[in-house]
Image: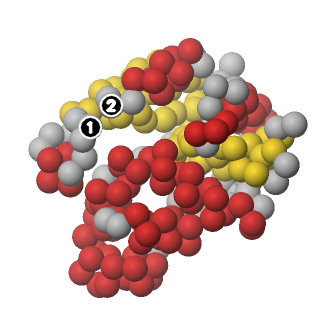
C-alpha cells in the first residue's frame, strides 16, 4: 500500500535525487552538465523535510518538492558547486540556477517540482501527492499554492489544470533558452487558491 509521508527518510535521498533529475533533467542538465555531477549535486543539496514522498514497501514512487519564503527542497550552496565544478564552473552554474528560482511570498507554498517513477505512473501517485499537499497547505495557513511548468510538458499542464491550477503568467525565455541549451521556450506560472 502506498503511503504519503512528509519528508524523506535518509535511505531514500539518493533515490529522490535520481528521480528528481530524471523528471526535471530538461531544466537542470543543461545548467549542471554531466548527469553524474548533476545527480551528486542534487543529492547533496536536498533538504529532506521540504517535500512529500510516496513510498511503497520501502521504495520511492514519487516526490513533490516544496518551497516557502523561508526554505526550499533544493538548497545548493557554493561550497558544493565548487566541489563538483571548480570556482569558475561553480559561479556559472550558480547564475544558471538562479534562472530556475522563484521567491515565494508569505502564505505562498511553491512546488519546486514533482517526480513520479516511470513504473508508478498511471496509478494516481501524483494526485495523491497533490491531495496531501493541499491538506498540508491548509493546516499550515498557506493561502496559495503555485508552480511553474514548461511549454514542452503539456501532460503536466493538463494535470495541473485538472487539479484546479490556473495560468497566471506566461514568460518567454528566448534567447536565454538558446544560450543555456534548454529545448523549451516558455515558462508557465500557475496558481491555486487554498479553499
Q: Quadrant of residue 16?
A: bottom right
- Toward the front, the furthest residue is 119
Left or right: 180, with 93 as reference point? left
Q: Residues within 10 Å of mark 2 (few under 14, many from 20)?
A: some
**Is residue 98 something one can see in this rendering?**
no
Quadrant containing the N terminus in the rendered view: top right
Residue under the image location 75 percent in, 67 percent down: 10
How many callouts does the rendering have? 2
> In the rendered image, which residue does mark 1 sit on?
184
Per the model, the C-alpha gap separating discs 1 and 2 is: 6 Å
Q: Position of residue 83 (x, y in %)?
A: 42, 84
Measuring from the top left, give residue 175's x and y in whole percent: 12, 44
Between 189 and 124, the one nearer to me in the picture:
124
Q: Position of residue 91 (x, y in %)?
A: 28, 74
Mark 2 — residue?
152
Under circle 2, the secondary element is: loop
At mark 1, the secondary structure is: loop
Kindly identify which numbered label has been placed on residue 85: none
Q: Is residue 172 above or below residue 30?
A: above
Q: Residue at x 73, y 57 (%)?
A: 8
Camera sees residue 65: yes
Indicate left or right for 44 with 87 as reference: right
The image quarter in which residue 189 lies: top left
> Is there CB contact under 8 Å for labels 1 and 2?
yes
Amino acid at each position: 500500500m502506498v503511503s504519503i509521508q512528509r519528508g524523506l527518510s535518509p535511505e531514500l535521498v539518493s533515490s529522490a535525487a535520481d528521480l528528481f533529475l530524471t523528471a526535471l533533467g530538461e531544466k537542470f542538465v543543461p545548467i549542471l552538465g554531466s548527469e553524474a555531477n548533476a545527480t551528486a549535486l542534487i543529492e547533496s543539496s536536498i533538504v529532506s523535510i521540504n517535500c512529500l514522498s510516496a513510498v511503497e514497501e520501502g521504495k520511492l514512487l514519487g516526490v513533490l518538492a516544496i518551497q516557502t519564503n523561508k526554505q526550499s527542497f533544493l538548497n545548493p550552496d557554493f561550497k558544493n558547486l565548487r566541489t563538483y565544478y571548480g570556482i569558475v564552473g561553480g559561479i556559472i552554474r550558480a547564475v544558471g540556477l538562479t534562472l530556475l528560482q522563484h521567491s515565494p511570498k508569505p502564505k505562498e507554498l511553491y512546488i519546486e517540482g514533482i517526480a513520479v517513477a516511470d513504473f508508478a505512473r498511471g496509478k494516481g501517485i501524483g494526485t495523491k501527492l497533490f491531495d496531501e499537499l493541499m491538506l498540508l497547505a491548509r493546516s499550515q495557513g498557506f493561502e496559495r499554492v503555485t508552480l511553474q511548468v514548461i511549454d514542452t510538458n503539456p501532460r503536466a499542464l493538463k494535470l495541473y489544470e485538472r487539479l484546479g491550477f490556473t495560468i497566471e503568467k506566461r514568460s518567454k525565455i528566448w534567447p536565454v533558452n538558446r544560450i543555456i541549451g534548454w529545448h523549451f521556450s516558455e515558462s508557465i506560472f500557475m496558481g491555486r487558491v487554498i479553499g
